[in-house]
C-alpha cells in the first residue's frame, strides 16, 4: 500500500511538471522573434544590402524611406542603432548635460533626432535642403551646412543654446516642460508630420536611461 502511494505521488508530480513545462515553453514564433530579427543588420538583409551593421549611404536612403512599422521592428533598443548613430545620440545627451537641459528636454531631443534621421548624420540633403541628425535646413535659419552637420553644434541649435540661427530652440518654447513631448518636438521642428514624434518617446527614455549615466557633459 505504501509503495503504491509513493508511485501515485511521483506520477502526480511528473504530471504537474509536464503541465508547467508546457505553459512555460517559448512558442517557436517568439523564439524566432528574439533571435536577431531586428537591428541594422536585419534591416540591411531585408533590403538586400550587405549586413555590415553600419549605416552606409544605401542603408541611410533605405531608412529614410522605410515605413514606421518596419522602423519600429528595426529599432527596439539602443543596441539596435549603428555604432556611429549611437555615438551621435550620446553627443545629443552630452550637449544637453553641458547646457544643463533637464532630462525631459534631453528625451525630447532624442525623440526628435530618432524621428528625423534615426541619428544618421546626413551630409547631403534627403528632403529639400534638410541636413544632419535633426534634418535642419540652412534656408530656414538653422545655420550653415557645416554647422548643421556638426552633431554637437546642431544639438545646441535644437536646444536653443547656439549663438547663431533665427529659429526658437527647445528652451525658447514657453512652457515646454509641461507640454506633451511630441508637441514640443513639433514646436521646434515645425514638421509637416507633427504626430510622428510621439511614437519614439519610450525608445528615447530607454536610450537616455541606458546611455546617459556614462555620457560626460559637452560644453
Image (cartoon, rainbow, N blue to C red):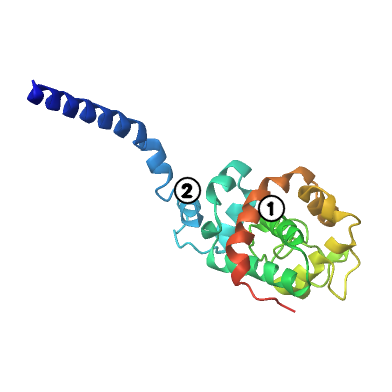
Residue found 19% across the figure and 26% down from its top? 9
**What is the secondary structure assignment of the residue under circle 2?**
helix
Residue found 48% across the figure and 50% down from its top? 38
- Residue holding disc 1: 115
**What is the secondary structure assignment of the residue under circle 1?**
helix
In the rendering, at what x and y percent does residue 29 appear?
39, 36
In the rendering, at what x and y percent does residue 149 appear?
72, 71
Q: Which mark is residue 170?
A: none
- Residue holding disc 2: 46
Residue 149 seen = no
Q: Quadrant of the N terminus?
A: top left
Asked whether 61 or 18 is in front, the reply is: 18
202 to the left or right of 101: left
In the rendering, at what x and y percent does residue 128 appear?
78, 57
79 to the left or right of 13: right
In the rendering, at what x and y percent does residue 157 appear?
81, 68
Label 2: few (<14), some or many (≥20) within 10 Å?
Answer: few
Residue 27, compared with residue 94, is above or below; it is above
Residue found 27% across the figure and 28% down from its top? 16
Residue 142, compared with residue 80, is above or below; it is below
Amino acid at each position: 500500500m505504501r509503495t503504491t502511494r509513493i508511485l501515485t505521488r511521483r506520477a502526480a508530480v511528473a504530471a504537474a511538471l509536464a503541465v508547467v513545462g508546457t505553459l512555460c515553453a517559448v512558442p517557436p514564433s517568439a523564439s524566432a522573434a528574439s533571435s536577431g530579427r531586428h537591428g541594422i543588420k536585419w534591416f540591411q538583409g531585408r533590403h538586400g544590402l550587405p549586413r555590415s551593421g553600419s549605416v552606409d549611404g544605401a542603408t541611410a536612403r533605405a531608412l529614410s524611406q522605410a515605413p514606421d512599422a518596419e522602423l519600429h521592428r528595426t529599432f527596439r533598443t539602443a543596441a539596435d542603432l549603428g555604432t556611429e548613430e549611437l555615438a551621435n545620440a550620446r553627443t545629443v545627451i552630452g550637449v544637453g548635460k553641458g547646457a544643463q537641459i533637464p532630462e525631459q528636454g534631453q528625451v525630447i531631443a532624442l525623440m526628435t533626432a530618432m524621428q528625423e534621421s534615426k541619428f544618421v548624420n546626413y551630409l547631403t540633403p534627403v528632403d529639400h535642403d534638410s541636413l544632419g541628425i535633426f534634418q535642419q535646413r540652412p534656408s530656414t535659419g538653422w545655420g550653415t551646412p557645416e554647422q548643421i552637420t556638426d552633431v554637437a553644434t546642431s544639438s545646441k541649435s535644437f536646444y536653443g543654446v547656439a549663438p547663431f540661427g533665427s529659429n526658437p530652440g527647445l528652451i525658447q518654447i514657453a512652457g515646454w516642460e509641461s507640454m506633451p513631448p511630441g508637441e514640443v518636438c513639433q514646436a521646434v521642428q515645425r514638421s509637416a508630420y507633427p504626430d510622428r514624434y510621439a511614437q519614439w518617446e519610450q525608445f528615447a527614455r530607454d536610450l537616455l536611461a541606458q546611455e546617459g549615466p556614462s555620457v560626460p557633459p559637452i560644453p
